[in-house]
Structure formats: C-alpha cells, structure tokens
Amino acid sequence: MGFEVELYEERRRKWRRSAFWKGFAIASAVIIVFLVIVAAVMGGRGNPTGPHIARFFLTDVIYDNPDRDALFAEMAENDDVKALVLRINSPGGTTAGSEALFDSLRKVAANKPVVAVLGEVAASGGYIAAISADHIIARGNTVTGSIGVIMEYPDVTALMERLGIEMQTIRSSDIKGGPSPFRPLTEEARAEELAMVEEANQWFRGLVSERRGLQGAALDAVATGGVFSGRQAVENGLIDAIGGEDEALAYLESLDAGLAEFNVETWELPVADASLLGALGMKLGINPLFNGLSGQSGPRLYSLKR
C-alpha cells in the first residue's frame, strides 16, 4: 500500500513538472508572438531615405498637431525629398489646426514643389490644406470648397428645466464663459462670437484670394460655405485639374523632367499611442476621430464640412 502511494505521488510530481514546462512554453510562445506583433506595428516608423518624392496622406478631421508640423519641417529641410504629393481626404477641422497645417505645408512648398491630390472630400480645412500646394488635382466627383467658418455648441437648457436642474455660475461679465450648454446665449455674447466667426471667415477668404487669384464677384461666388464637385471646382478656379496621383506626378515632371527617376515614398506620423492596442488601432486604420474628439473641450472655431 505504501509503495502504491509513493508511486502515485511520484506520478503527480512528474505531471506537475510536465504541466509547468508546458505552461512555460505556451507563455513563452505568447510573449514571442506579442513581441513580433509589436515589432511589426512599431517598426518601419522611420521616414524614407535616399532621393525620392514624398507622399503624405492627410485624412480625417484636422486638429492642431505638433508632430505633424515637425514632420513637415523635417521634410522641408530634407534634401532627399525632391517634391511632395499631398493626398487629402478630410472634411476639415478646427480653424486654428487648419491654419497651423497650412503654414507647415507652405514651408515645404518654399523649398520644393508640392501638389495636392483630393480624394472623396477635401472641404473647409481640407481645402485650406489643398491651397497650400502649388497645384491642385481632384476627381470629378470630389467634394470640395465649403469655404466658411462655423461654431457649434449644445443647448441643454430645456432639458435641465424639465429635470429641475439649475447651473449656478458666478462670472465677471455676461460674455465670460460663453457660449455654454447650460444657459441661453445673450445677445451681447452672440454678437461677440459672431464677430470672431466673421473675422476667421475673412482670413479664410483672404487665403483663397491670395492662393487662387480670386477676387470680387469671383471670390464671392465660391466663398458661400457651399460645396462643389471637382468639375465645378475646375470651372470656378478652386482647383487646377481633374485626375489622381498619376496626373500629379506628370505635373511634377513638367516642372523638372529629372523627377521622373525618383520613386514615390510615403511619410507617416509616429504612432501617438505607445500601447499595443493603440498602435494596432492606428495600423489597422481605425478612425482616430474619436481620439481627437475626446481631447477637445470647450467651443472652437471649425472649418468643417457638415
């Protein structure tokens, strides 16, 4: 009986050792797969080297982005970058973010040719980015234009009244802290906000006038806040031609035949979220709009196609 118990215990010890090493092997395999995925996701973030034509995809809603501005500053000073093809598919974004993007792209254009290729939509702030280029190409059915500025905010005062909720605020003046979703906007505050929207709109119109050579009635006709197809945009002077990247490269080669010998290489922003899930989300193309919106608070001026 004692011998059988000892044999049973020995078998249990062997099973435990075997189970431990099996578990260790499985855990090691999982860690290796994890590291391989991280390497695949995180790897390749360095921008191209050697003489080339740079390509950059500008997508989704435009916010202020120092990393993006730094990338264009590097591109502007990089002698390996012979030209830039800017692929735009964006409904616009904040007016300040679009302004920063425009300034960054103009620094690139000061040193090398830039051509914009518009995708499904390049409106409002997306169009601001487009007019930073020397030449603009779009599909015939691209949605573009939407030259104007908007400010929006929710008004939950009716709901608060129904629920019996009051928001108590102490402020130095009637226009301080407005607009707010918790109280109606006074006429004085509305006038202040409208003046700011109109001032930003005049800035936008000035950019269009300067970059596209439109003035007077021709500028008034396009700066209505409305949108245009690519074909209409060619007719009214907002863009230069219908086509895609092939036509963009042909334009660049018309400026300098030597550009034909260079490959087009894509530049990318660094992954903002260092976590595996964040990196995978960026790699899989999950729309970063939610991250952008989660970081926004308070009223903002938008150049955004609604």
Image: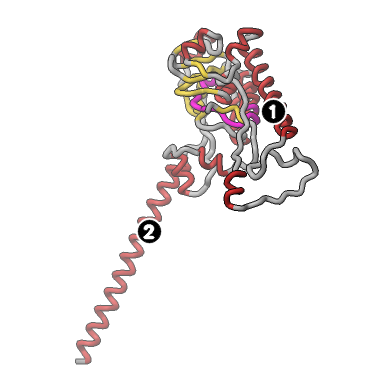
Q: Nearer the viewer, residue 31 or 148?
A: 148
Range covered by the magenta-colored residues: 80-99
Query: Could you say which is closer to the camera, residue 175 or residue 271?
Result: 175
What's the mark number on residue 194?
A: 1
Q: Position of residue 151 (x, y in %)?
A: 63, 31
Which numbered circle lies on residue 28?
Answer: 2
Name the main secondary structure of what is drawn in magenta.
Answer: strand
254 or 48: which is nearer to us?
Answer: 254
Residue 82 appears in the picture as rendered:
no
List x then y, in percent, for residue 265.
Answer: 47, 26
Front of the two marks 1 and 2: 1
**What crowding class fits label 2: few (fewer than 14 Cα within 10 Å), some (14-19), or many (20 or more)?**
few
Asked if residue 78 lies left or right of residue 15, the reply is right
Q: Amino acid at mark 2?
A: Ser
**Rendered location of residue 193, percent (x, y):** 70, 31
Q: Residue at x 65, y 30 (%)?
A: 96
Query: Which image quarter is the N terminus in?
Result: bottom left
Residue 269: where, in percent of width, then height?
54, 35
Tally of numbered tags:
2
Q: Residue at x 42, y 42 (%)?
A: 40
Q: Secondary structure at mark 1?
A: helix
Q: Does the CB distance between marks 1 and 2 fall below 8 Å?
A: no
Q: Is residue 230 magenta?
A: no
Q: Amino acid at mark 1?
A: Leu
Q: Is residue 189 left or right of residue 272?
A: right
The alpha-carbon separation of the residues under discs 1 and 2 comes to 62 Å
Res 138 visible: yes
Q: Quadrant of residue 135?
A: top right
